[in-house]
Amino acid sequence: MGFEDSVLICDEVDPVLNKILQDNGLKVSYEPKITPEQIKEKISNFNIVIVRSRTTITREIIEKADKCKIIARVGVGLDNVDQVAAKEKNIRVINAAEGAMNAVAELVLGLMLSLARQTARGDRAIRNGQWLKNELKGTELRGKYLGIVGLGNIGKRLGRLARALNMNIIGYDVVPIDEEFSKEVGLMKADLDTLLQSSDYISIHVPLLDSTYHLINAQKISTMKKTAKIINTSRGGVVDEDALYDALKSGNLGGAALDVFEKEPATGNKLAELDNVILTPHIGAQTKEAQSLAANITGEKIIQILRGVI
């Protein structure tokens, strides 16, 4: 059975999503460069709106979405959709959290390895005519303690990858942690303060909420080992960048790797001044495989909702 619903896609997505929707009879308007003002003007004509991270669906936009049934995010976070406003209009909000699981976890692993061996600093040095062989003495991940803050899909995938390198895994979450996973990786469950005090590497995997804004602040950083390294691939506001900068510059923290920032694009960010930081431009989910999988998951979820399956 085909559907006659109309779909507005506001960002670039893998072509598989268009195919799934069109194969099921949906009318797709693909406008990856559409502006917020244009969305506001057009949204009343659509039953389904699809975004990635570029587009923010505000209350102002949602108030004009008179026919909308579903807002779908082809990715993990939903902080670019006003979920309260959507709920008031009885609009279903969904994401494809599973799609980026492996891509983000692999990025974290790569960033940890780079921090451990100072490869980014070595690369910069050679480009600047320096040969820092003796200065760049690194450490190994084997035997180190990795603290994972947030053990959802990505956190668990990271735990499995890190355990394969014989790291010790400490975990914290506000919700019960999967017991089967805990046994599999030998997880040491801890409260947040204990995790921060005990870990050599700390990887953040929580959504940006009022309760997680600046979760990692000056006070929390002060309790960490001076050699500890923070990796944030979740959302920028979870880490207080000013406090992080001060700790890194003063030598009270060993290093950091950030893929997300409080203000994006993060060009001109003062953290770029520091040698013990790796900065990447929010590329956690930017793999061909993750984009295809997230698009596939999004398309299938939309069809299942329309069929009344979920």
Image (spheres, rainbow, N blue to C red):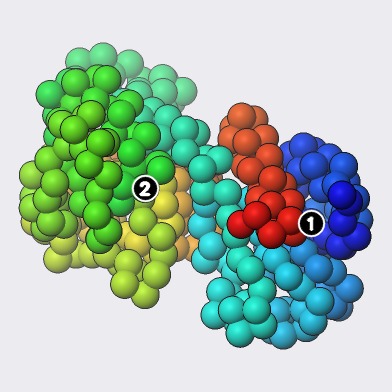
Q: Is residue 66 visible?
A: yes
Disc assigned to residue 176: none
Q: Secondary structure at mark 2?
A: loop
**Residue 135 x %, y %:** 20, 21
**Residue 113 x %, y %:** 31, 26
Q: Nearer the viewer, residue 143 or 71?
A: 71
User: Which image quarter: residue 139?
Assistant: top left
* Label 1 Cα neighbours within 10 Å, binned few <14 / some 14-19 / many ≥20: many
Q: Quadrant of the C terminus?
A: bottom right
Question: Which residue is denoted by mark 2 in the rendering?
Answer: 152
Question: Amino acid under label 1?
Answer: Ile
Question: Which residue is denoted by mark 1 in the rendering?
Answer: 9
**Residue 253 x %, y %:** 17, 47
Where 148 sits versus 107, above or below? below
Question: Amino acid under label 2?
Answer: Gly
**Residue 251 x %, y %:** 15, 47
User: Which image quarter: residue 108?
Assistant: top left
In this rendering, position of residue 239 left or right of residue 100: left
Task: Give me the C-alpha separation between circle 1 and circle 2.
Answer: 27 Å
Q: Residue at x 86, y 62 (%)?
A: 5
Q: Residue at x 79, y 38 (%)?
A: 15
Q: Secondary structure at mark 1?
A: strand
In this rendering, position of residue 40 left or right of residue 293: right
User: Which image quarter: residue 290?
Assistant: top right
- Tag count in the figure? 2
Q: Nearer the viewer, residue 265 or 153?
A: 153
In this rendering, position of residue 201 left or right of residue 120: left
Label whose residue precedes the other's in the sequence (1 or 2): 1
In this rendering, position of residue 83 left or right of residue 158: right
Q: Nearer the viewer, residue 169 or 183?
A: 183
